[in-house]
Amino acid sequence: MTTAHPVQDLDVQPTPLALLLLGREADPKSERGVECPGDLPSPSDPDLVERARAAKEKLGDKVFVLGHHYQRDEVIQFADVTGDSFKLARDAAARPEAEYIVFCGVHFMAESADILTTEDQKVVLPDLAAGCSMADMATAEQVAECWDVLTEAGVAEQVVPVSYMNSSADIKAFTGRHGGTICTSSNAKRALEWAFEQGEPSAVKVLFLPDQHLGRNTAVRDMGMTLADCVLYNPHKPNGGLTAEELRDAKMILWRGHCSVHGRFSVDSVNDVRERIPGVNVLVHPECKHEVVAAADYVGSTEYIIKALEAAPAGSKWAIGTELNLVRRLANRFAAEDKEIVFLDKTVCFCSTMNRIDLPHLVWTLESLAEGNLVNRIEVDPETEKYAKLALERMLALP
């Protein structure tokens, strides 16, 4: 819980939501904090790049900067490594000599890095307001209540939780306590196969958290299940909006969560780009809606998307359904190879929380660390870490 700043010169009492949006309050039911203490450099400061470079040079091997693929270019230029959330967490764990791990990503990613690194390493998030709307859609209290519903329906003993990497440490810990595993968008199929091997396959059910689309797409597209095998648990409805019979009949119990970026793409987006660019290849992330995935030519994780474009022949045309910063970076990277790469939708679609990590926040963070001031440290409590790490280790053990 962060401490709220006093609100002055207002004639009315601001609502909790208003304070949250202003960055002056914390949401106790959210996995993210939102207060960023200290004064940030002005975003118009022309010396920001040099200041970041100087602070990073002063820190030397004491700092290791991780940059998620969805970060803006001004931040990525200072990353020692780039990648998706799990790759970056593992990269951090592989650098035990680095005292500070500066994670240019979002809150759940920094939590995972803290879980996987040593006690001597300190994980820092440049802006504590860099959360994840998907991760926030499943709180510990809501998931505990869901488990009670499953217990009352008489199916809890048959349920194996599988949680997406894009979840809070609390949800990862819940997964570990209940015999489940974590998955990424790259290994979701293998994680589900493992889950169904934990009992009689015809009896086992999976509770998939928190992204309904990745769970549904993996089950139906990759594993041959039907849409009827999947039910949607809505934490905002009594009993999740499901009957005990529906829970007993289901193979996949999908949490009602989604990515606000990938959820924007539609079949109309796919049809429109095919009309505008004859011969285009449509490549989308599996966090997209099922109908979008069904209409696409290729589907895969962020790393899959990058590798597919690397291997694509010169002169090929691609419409990519994922975060805009990455799509722009790939378009610029492969332009010299005569590969036409466009954003799937006409509407600009940045990840708003990821974009809270900007150059002023990074400069403030690096300069603070260089001066010996530890800021914005992300720490997972030992009990949560124990069970979250157990779930992560189950994933690491998957063939």
Image: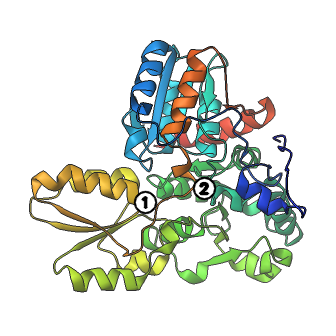
Label 1 is placed on what type of residue? Glu
Label 2 is placed on what type of residue? Ala
Q: Position of residue 129 (x, y in %)?
A: 66, 47
Q: Nearer the viewer, residue 281 or 184?
A: 281
Residue annotated with mark 1: 323
Colour scheme of the rendered structure = rainbow
Determine the secondary structure under disc 1. Answer: loop
**Does residue 24 appear to the left or right of 119 in the view shown?**
right
- Compared to residue 229, the image places residue 199 above or below, namely above
Determine the secondary structure under disc 2. Answer: helix
Residue annotated with mark 2: 195
Residue 109 at least partly seen: yes
Instruction: Tell me what residue is drawn at x 58 percent, y 49 percent.
Output: 165
Instruction: Tell me what residue is drawn at x 80 percent, y 33 percent.
Output: 383
Q: Position of residue 43 (x, y in %)?
A: 50, 42
**Does residue 341 appear to the left or right of 8 in the view shown?**
left
Q: Residues within 10 Å of mark 2 (few under 14, many from 20)?
A: many
Q: Are marks 1 and 2 in contact (CB under 8 Å)?
A: no
Which numbered marker is on residue 35? none
Instruction: Tell me what residue is drawn at x 11 percent, y 52 percent.
Output: 336
Tell which circle, 1 or 2, labels the residue nearer the N-terminal end: 2
Quadrant where the image shows the N terminus: top right
